[in-house]
Image (spheres, rainbow, N blue to C red):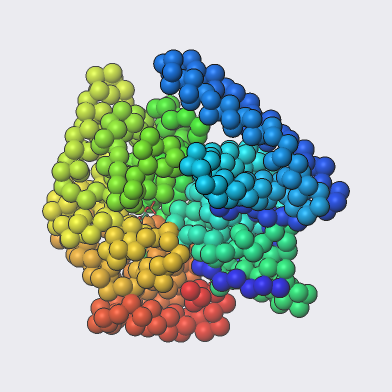
């Protein structure tokens, strides 16, 4: 039995078998196989070899055709060498032997054998041979990609329930998981507000990220306990531990069931102040989860997921269908559509012609849209067309200068003029607002307030840009907190600017769904919170247990602290007063 600590990102406890998902040659899934599986693994190796040889042969002929004589022939020779190596018995026989005698999966046999070969080439005195080590690494990657691509398809054809273990998961991989088969996940990398974690919470799969070395410590089929409340993963637990966790599982389900009874009750404080609880969604069907959890509408629709989960760029019709479906499901309730927030962790850098060195500070969100106007206009046309079907707001993400907002609004105006010319109906009064998620926007909130119909504070990004802490990096996760006085001062400034200009200020960062912050947020003056739908009942319960005077006092007190540690410990103490037994597990960090 081994206990691995990570970051708790999606609540609940699951006990199940591991499915190890390898992603790159550095993170080869290691599996001990039984004698019966030797033939299957050997067949997988053969299939991967055949696939790689097929791809290389195609590449070779394409290169010969496309490149000018001399160069083409030269380049084709490299592929010929690669194909030759993949047919070379002195390489293949030891690989097969590894599967048969060491009883390891094909990925391990390939990776180990190529490692050895690369070392041999490197140790040769001749420079030409040393260069060959790079060819070997290239081939190793190619073969592993064949094998792991097959692992991915294994993932989409699961026949039993599993817990996914991976070095890292992309948001789209997580979003594509079959909820009936994948019951939990644990990864080496990641932070509380990385999009993978957000999606895990949305689909309600207990998850622990930032475990650093779990993909190496776990083998396919190992029994695991994932505790998404405390951020612990137990590998190969003993009977006693399993029994303990089963008890906790029961407690958690009872607590969830008790929360469900709040569904149709308002989120009103004991002294009658109403707070609107809206949901954050990535896909239209999540509206069902908002309604089932007692939410009042969509405060943030992350439309870029439409882009991320499709093989090709979505058409205007694809956008339109998604938005009208969301509006239909909402049946008159409000919907805030955020325009594409592509980039950073939500636009695979592999797809870019030239990956950015600093994607979180790079061409993302509104910046990306302003430089890719056709994509932006396509989306805006679809939103405006859909606006005739229900109450819609448009929200621009990551605005950092007033000029960006003005340019985005101009493009929207162009789109509206085009629709006018085509006699296409749309709502002429769609409110246009911004996400405040960059310090420059927060500091300039008074200016932005004169040109925006509303603000929604995106603390996930605001925290990372204010504190210079990557939201997805487990190594600095201890520094990433919304309780930092600098973040809270910015939030207060935005609220103040909104109040002055009489525009709505809501919050849609993950802290809106963390019970620890609820009293503080409503004490500061928020009356609309937008959060992951599954957290709505928990937050409602906190709101229904407190009065506004208490929350305002708490907010004032928090304002007097100068360290995040003081803020957190004070908030915990106050929360403990509402739920002394911590049955909600909300005090666990
Ligand atoms: C945020 O940054 O707080 C936010 C809600 O947007 P996202 O998490 O999609 O970046
Ligand atoms: Mg953001």
Q: Name which residue lies at 39% across and 57% down.
A: 530
Asked whether, in this view, residue 416 is left or right of residue 101, the answer is left
The foreground one among 461 and 356 is: 356
| Residue 104 versus residue 254 in the image, above or below | above
Q: Name which residue lies at 49% across and 77% down.
A: 587
Asked whether, in this view, residue 350 is left or right of residue 146, the answer is left
The foreground one among 234 and 436 is: 234
Quadrant of the rendering where the N terminus is positioned: bottom right
Asked whether, in this view, residue 470 is left or right of residue 537, the answer is left
For the image, the number of numbered tags is: 0
Residue 397 screen position, x and y as percent: 30, 47
Res 563 visible? yes
The foreground one among 586 and 215 is: 215
| Residue 537 versus residue 151 in the image, above or below | below
Residue 53 screen position, x and y as percent: 64, 29
Name which quarter of the figure residue 40 lies in.
top right
Residue 46 screen position, x and y as percent: 73, 35
Res 502 visible? no
Asked whether, in this view, residue 119 is left or right of residue 543, the answer is right
Q: Name which residue lies at 60% across and 63% down.
A: 214
Q: Name which residue lies at 50% across and 38% down.
A: 128
Displayed-image quarter of ligand 1: bottom left
Task: List the single residue furthest toward the right.
Answer: 36
The foreground one among 515 and 288 is: 515
Residue 169 screen position, x and y as percent: 53, 51
| Residue 205 versus residue 585 in the image, above or below | above
């Amino acid at each position: 039995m081994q206990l691995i600590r990570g970051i708790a990102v999606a609540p609940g406890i699951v006990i199940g078998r591991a499915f190890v998902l390898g992603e790159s040659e550095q993170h080869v899934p290691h599996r001990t196989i039984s004698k019966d599986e030797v033939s299957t693994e050997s067949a997988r190796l053969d299939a991967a070899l055949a696939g790689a040889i097929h791809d290389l042969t195609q590449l070779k002929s394409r290169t010969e055709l496309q490149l000018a004589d001399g160069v083409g022939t030269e380049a084709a020779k490299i592929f010929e060498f690669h194909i030759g190596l993949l047919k070379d018995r002195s390489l293949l026989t030891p690989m097969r032997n590894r599967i048969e005698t060491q009883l390891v999966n094909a990925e391990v046999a390939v990776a180990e054998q190529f490692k050895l070969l690369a070392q041999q080439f490197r140790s040769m005195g001749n420079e030409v041979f040393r260069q060959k080590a790079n060819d070997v690494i290239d081939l190793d990657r190619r073969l592993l990609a064949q094998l792991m691509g097959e692992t991915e398809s294994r993932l989409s054809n699961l026949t039993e329930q599993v817990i996914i273990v991976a070095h890292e998961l992309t948001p789209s991989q997580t979003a594509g998981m079959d909820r009936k088969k994948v019951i939990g996940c644990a990864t080496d990398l990641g932070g509380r507000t990385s999009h993978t974690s957000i999606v895990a919470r949305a689909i309600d799969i207990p998850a622990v990220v930032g475990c650093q070395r779990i993909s190496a410590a776990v083998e396919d089929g190992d029994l695991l306990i994932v505790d998404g409340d405390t951020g612990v993963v137990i590998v190969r637990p003993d009977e006693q531990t399993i029994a303990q966790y089963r008890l906790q599982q029961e407690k958690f389900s009872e607590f969830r069931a008790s929360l469900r009874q709040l569904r149709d009750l308002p989120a009103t404080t004991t002294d009658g102040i109403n707070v609107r609880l809206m949901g954050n969604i990535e896909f239209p069907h999540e509206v069902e989860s908002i309604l089932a959890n007692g939410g009042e509408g969509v405060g943030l629709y992350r439309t870029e997921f439409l882009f991320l989960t499709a093989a090709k760029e979505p058409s205007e019709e694809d956008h339109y269908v998604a938005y009208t479906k969301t509006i239909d499901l909402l049946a008159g309730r409000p919907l805030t559509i955020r325009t594409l927030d592509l980039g950073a962790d939500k636009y695979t850098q592999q797809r870019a012609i030239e990956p950015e060195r600093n994607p979180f500070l790079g061409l993302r969100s509104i910046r990306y849209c302003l430089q890719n106007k056709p994509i932006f206009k396509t989306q805006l046309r679809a939103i405006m067309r859909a606006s005739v079907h229900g109450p819609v707001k448009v929200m621009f993400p990551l605005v950092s200068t007033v000029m960006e907002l003005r340019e985005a609004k101009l493009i929207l105006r162009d789109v509206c003029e085009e629709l006018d010319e085509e006699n296409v109906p749309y709502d002429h009064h769609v409110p246009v607002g911004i996400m405040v998620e960059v310090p420059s926007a927060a500091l300039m909130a008074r200016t932005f307030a004169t040109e925006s119909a509303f603000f929604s504070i995106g603390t996930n990004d605001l925290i990372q840009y204010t504190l210079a802490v990557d939201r997805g990096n487990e190594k600095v996760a201890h520094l990433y907190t919304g309780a930092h006085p600098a973040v809270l001062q910015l939030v207060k400034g935005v609220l103040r600017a909104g109040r002055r200009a009489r525009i709505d200020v809501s919050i849609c960062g993950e802290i809106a769904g963390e019970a620890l912050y609820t009293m503080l947020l409503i004490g500061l003056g928020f009356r609309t919170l937008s959060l992951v739908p599954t957290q709505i009942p928990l937050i409602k319960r906190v709101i229904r247990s407190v009065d506004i005077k208490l929350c305002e006092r708490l907010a004032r007190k928090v304002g007097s602290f100068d360290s995040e540690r003081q803020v957190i410990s004070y908030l915990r103490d106050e929360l403990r007063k509402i739920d002394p037994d911590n049955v909600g597990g909300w005090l666990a960090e």
